[in-house]
Amino acid sequence: MAKNRNSFNLWVVLRVLESLLLIVTGVLSIIYSNDASLQKVIFILVGVFLIIDGGLRIMKYFMNPLTPQKKAVVTSVFEFTVGVMLCIKAGVLVGLVNEFLTLFMGILLIVVSVVFLLMGTVEASKKRNRNMTSVIVNYVVGILLLAGGLFILIEGANLVTATIIVAGVLFILVGIAEFVYTFYKPRTKIVK
């Protein structure tokens, strides 16, 4: 019992640190988005976040190896790999942003926004155990991500700066959502 409690406490501490890293990375991305010399550093920070997030999820599996988490390990390995690539080739990737990554980021944000909006709709449609905090977080994050994705796809002039700003907003939102979900405990009713 004590081992599970210590594992849970370690997981909470790591998730809080990760959410704070996300928020700080987002704020720095927004503040320094126009500074060409710091754009490479921003990509490295994003890579570091992906490495940490992927590593934490892989570590969680080995702390408590459950069958449903096996799929998360595969995506975490991919996330970890992308993070390493961003750290190693950040300078090259800054140059590719205008061609490929901007389009990818815009479409990705729109797709993720649709997922958040659908999750909010599913949560709102529940008759029992409806959690309005979860509904509101999903809708707000979904709408902001949709706006960011559309902004990237429509804006044509300063795509590197726009992408970094929207990515910064995304990191802040995901950091806040992760912090909330770390301490969120769904209410369950026991049916007798």
Image: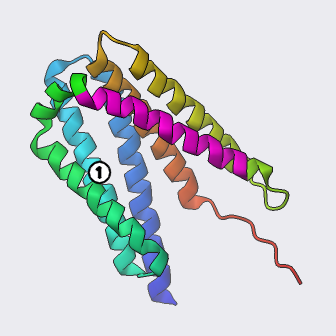
Q: Residue at 31% across / 59% down in the picture?
A: 54
Against 99, is 167 above or below?
below
Q: Residue at 17% across / 28% down in the picture?
A: 96
Picture coordinates of residue 41, whole percent (x, y): 18, 34
Against 117, is 126 above or below?
below
Residue 80 visible in rendering: yes
Which residue, as the protein is rendered here, is positioned at the far top? 157
Picture coordinates of residue 95, whole percent (x, y): 14, 25
Q: Quadrant of residue 152?
A: top left
What is the crowding at mark 1: few (fewer than 14 residues within 10 Å), some, or many (at least 20)?
many
In the image shown, does 62 or 146 lie closer to the viewer?
A: 146
* Residue tagged 1: 50
Query: What are the residue bounds of the magenta stretch?
Result: 100-122
In the image shown, does 113 or 30 lie closer to the viewer?
A: 113
Q: Is residue 183 left or right of residue 88?
A: right
Provide the major secondary structure of the magenta segment: helix
Picture coordinates of residue 105, whole percent (x, y): 36, 33
Q: Is residue 88 left or right of residue 149?
A: left
